[in-house]
């Protein structure tokens, strides 16, 4: 059997890993005892694993997570962090993405094949301002609308301006009922209610169904928001890795 034409066809179909695995099988005497179905299964598995790994790498690069190496397996359950293992296991299933619903959860979303974007609020507002100036504003909004999980960090560090409030409304209007959003609130200790007030005035009417509840970060002198009924899952603090 002439292998070269088949290898060329596989590469032309962009089945590069399958082609390499098939060639390796022919060079490995131990595979001669395997049946056709077993050898085919190994080839398909090699191609599938390679594509899954490449997709995960691409999703993580696009997410631009602040803590890129954070993962749920390394999560610390120190007593002072008040994390519940059962709740984390439930969040790790990813149902909060497809149903109603920090970097660790976003990374888990990438591993499940979802598109994720992480933005700190000050940088987000700068990015929107530049996009408005260079004519890419609509394109940028469309990118946010397509993202399965949008992580908005450091909310409440500064008062929200009217133009910023309108920008957030545009983003949440496109995502309402379709995508999930994580808000992380970081309120300065001297103004404990400012983050909550700005969040309610900017985009609260567009985030209940498929977005997460906003929760404050710990470690900056702030207090937790008082829990209230919601259909979405709460988010743990972001010191996860």
Image (tube, rainbow, N blue to C red):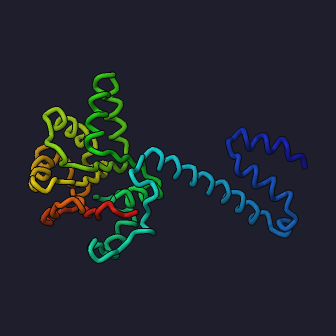
Q: Which of 93 and 69 is in front in this view?
A: 69
Residue that appears at 80% across and 56% down: 24
Place of residue 115 in the rendered image (x, y in percent of width and height, measured from the top left): 42, 48
In-image side of 229 versus 94 (left or right): left
In-image side of 198 versus 76 (left or right): left
Up the image or down, 168 lies above or below 135; here it is: below
Up the image or down, 22 lies above or below 201; here it is: below
Q: How many labels does the image show?
A: 0
Place of residue 214 in the rendered image (x, y in percent of width and height, measured from the top left): 21, 56
Place of residue 82 in the rendered image (x, y in percent of width and height, measured from the top left): 26, 73
Q: Which of the 4 image quarters holds residue 62?
A: top left
Q: Nearer the viewer, residue 158 or 48?
A: 158
Residue that appears at 21% across and 54% down: 185
Place of residue 228 in the rendered image (x, y in percent of width and height, measured from the top left): 13, 65
In-image side of 96 versus 13 (left or right): left
Up the image or down, 225 lies above or below 186; here it is: below
Residue that appears at 28% across and 32% down: 128
Q: Which residue lies furthest to the right in this view?
A: 1
Residue that appears at 76% across and 62% down: 39
Q: Which of 169 and 193 is in front in this view?
A: 193
Where's the C terminus, which quadrant? bottom left
In-image side of 59 versus 160 (left or right): right
């Amino acid at each position: 059997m002439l292998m070269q034409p088949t290898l060329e066809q596989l590469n032309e179909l962009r089945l590069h890993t399958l082609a390499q695995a098939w060639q390796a099988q022919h060079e490995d005497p131990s595979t001669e005892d395997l049946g056709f179905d077993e050898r085919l299964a190994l080839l398909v598995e090699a191609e599938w694993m390679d594509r899954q790994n490449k997709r995960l790498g691409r999703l993580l690069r696009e997410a631009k997570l602040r803590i890129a190496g954070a993962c749920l397996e390394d999560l610390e359950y120190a007593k002072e962090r008040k994390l519940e293992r059962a709740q984390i296991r439930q969040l790790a299933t990813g149902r909060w993405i497809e149903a109603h619903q920090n970097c660790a959860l976003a990374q888990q979303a990438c591993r499940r094949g979802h598109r994720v974007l992480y933005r700190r609020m000050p940088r987000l507002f700068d990015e929107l301002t530049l996009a408005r100036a260079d004519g890419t504003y609509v394109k940028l909004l469309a990118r946010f609308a397509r993202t399965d999980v949008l992580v908005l960090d450091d909310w409440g560090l500064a008062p929200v301006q009217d133009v910023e409030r309108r920008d957030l409304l545009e983003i949440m209007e496109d995502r309402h009922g379709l995508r999930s959003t994580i808000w992380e609130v970081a309120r300065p200790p001297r103004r404990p209610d400012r983050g909550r007030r700005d969040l309610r005035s900017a985009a609260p009417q567009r985030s209940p169904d498929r977005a997460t509840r906003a929760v404050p970060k710990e470690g900056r002198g702030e207090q937790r928001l008082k829990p209230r009924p919601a259909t979405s899952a709460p988010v743990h603090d972001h010191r996860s890795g």
